[in-house]
Image (cartoon, grey):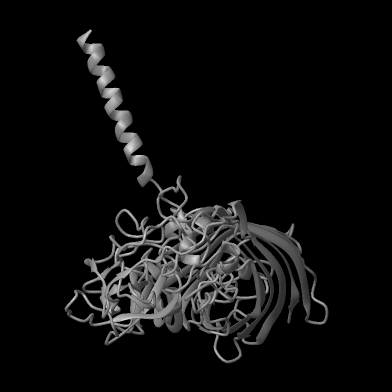
Amino acid sequence: MNKNISQSVSRVLLYGVIIALLPTIGVQAFTGQSSYNPRSQGAQVARDLVGWQTLINQPSEGCFYGAFAITPAYARSFEPKEMAELLLGSCSLPVSGSRVTDRGPRDILADYFGLPSDYKSTLCFKPQIKNFILDLQCYLGLDHICDGLYLRFDLPIVNTTWDLALRECITVKGVASYPAGYLFTDTLTRKNLTEDADDFFIGKEPLPGDIRESLENGRIWGRAVSNGIAELRAVVGWNYAGDHHHAGVNFRVAAPTGTRPSSEFLFEPIIGNGKHWEVGGGVTAHGYLWCNEDAGSSLAVYLDANVVHLARASQKRSFDLVNNGPGSRYMLLEAFADPSHDLFFGPMGPAAPNQYKRCLFPAINKTTLDVKVSFAVQADLALKLSYHYRGLELDCGYNFFGRTAEKLHCRERFPAGLYAVKGDAQVYGFDAITNNPIPLSATQSKATLHGGQGLGNSNYRNLNADSSVVAYDSNGTLNQLQGEFGMIPVTTVQTSNPAVLLSDADIDTRAALVPHAMSHGVFFHAGNVWCVIDNWQPFFGFGGSVEWASGCARKNSTYSQWSLWLKGGVGF
């Protein structure tokens, strides 16, 4: 009997622990990752290798030869959950106002977006990337200058479409007003507030009350398109080649002709590698496993591997705040000025050293800063088996792509003493005699994207503000206004002594850097090389690949994708 009682008590305690921990599981919306810089559309060694391998890296004959290839390709991402988890933490983000009774710990506070305090919705995402690529390649064998010497050029022209497929499902549209002093000097009714969360994230104007700026950076847009050249790549190499084998090394450099990340969008269409110069080298080799010259058939193994360094590049990056957690860049900041005017910490003073400046704005508009970043190493390797029968070629192989985590070299400094975190604080008190609004100095340095600090500001008195004290002006205590809101009794309002203002040390530098990238893929290609026609050898084929991002989605900056291509050209 005692044993059964003991087991029952143990179960109750275990269930209690599980229930207690549930609110802490996955409580963050968004992540610290504000930039997405995946594998360049031009870094595809498998696609480069197939189709023309018998026309390049030929045995030395002391003469000039070459080949030209055109490869139209289409690539499309799959596994959208991977990209959503990296950037957003989830494929769906709940949004609710501070007056919603069943707010979850993962809910984004709707108040930050000028939405009603009883608003409730869910933002749903299904990210997808589509690339159309026209890859132009040229190989020139310079045996007439030096045996085994060659040049190679690559020009991938890209059309890319990035789509977060944002859809908002509104549960409660909301009818609640905000009292005077919360976002503005007057009461804000539903007609004065933002229509829905989607409007805020796309940067729609105007916004209510003192929110003077719409979202300028990190905008969550549905579909964005970009066109350009990924990189202009040049390779100089040397081969030791025989009839049935070759081995060689090369030096390569790529000029950054793609797009430069600007952080205007959270899911920003990037062409190329993020405007980095690439410098590095590679190896190339093949050998026959079996050959029947009489039948014109053979089986060979081919290897191409490239390793490069992505040099420093100037970009813009949006940062969260150290004390406020992932996604804090989408919270509201208050502008502060000093000295204060008619704001005191007691009936006889002292005067507050600084004061709210009647201006609110999304934090990301101020925490988007210039940076210089680089990647130490990027590797792209393709290993394949190739069967030849006369002019017919059948290839299948494996592709590995890897890149180290991004390194920050320097960034623009964030100005100190100008801004503070609002949280759910009242920003105005009202003169007890005239009812004139007086800007406060109330800050909430520990507020998060999910709510104000502490237990919240349900009574709008600022009891949860930093170092809160009763606020005064020259006529006495500053009060709330009951006004149209009705539910709030007229009572004193508090402010911070002192206000906690942001500095450069509050910028969370590490969180915005791009993590490492790693993927594994398989590919195939089938084609034909026709017989020599007046020293010209036309070729044509088709192929495809499937690539899977490897490891934890939140720590991998590339994505899973499949691709199809045609490849044709001529050897000479």
Q: Residue at x 58, y 59 (%)?
A: 384
Q: Quadrant of the C terminus?
A: bottom right
Q: Is residue 470 left or right of residue 435?
A: left
Q: Position of residue 91 (x, y in %)?
A: 54, 53
Q: Position of residue 445 (x, y in %)?
A: 29, 67
Q: Residue furthest top?
A: 1
Q: Is residue 426 above or below residue 239?
A: above
Q: Quadrant of the N terminus?
A: top left
Q: Residue 353 or 300: which is nearer the viewer?
A: 353
Q: Position of residue 465 (x, y in %)?
A: 28, 64
Q: Residue 187 or 570: which is nearer the viewer?
A: 187
Q: Position of residue 371 (x, y in %)?
A: 40, 82
Q: Residue at x 40, y 64 (%)?
A: 32
Q: Number of callouts in the render?
A: 0
Q: Residue furthest front?
A: 433
Q: Is residue 47 above or below residue 350?
A: above
Q: Residue 179 or 564: which is nearer the viewer?
A: 179
Q: Residue 560 or 223: which is nearer the viewer?
A: 223
Q: Residue at x 36, y 57 (%)?
A: 459
Q: Is residue 85 left or right of residue 430?
A: right
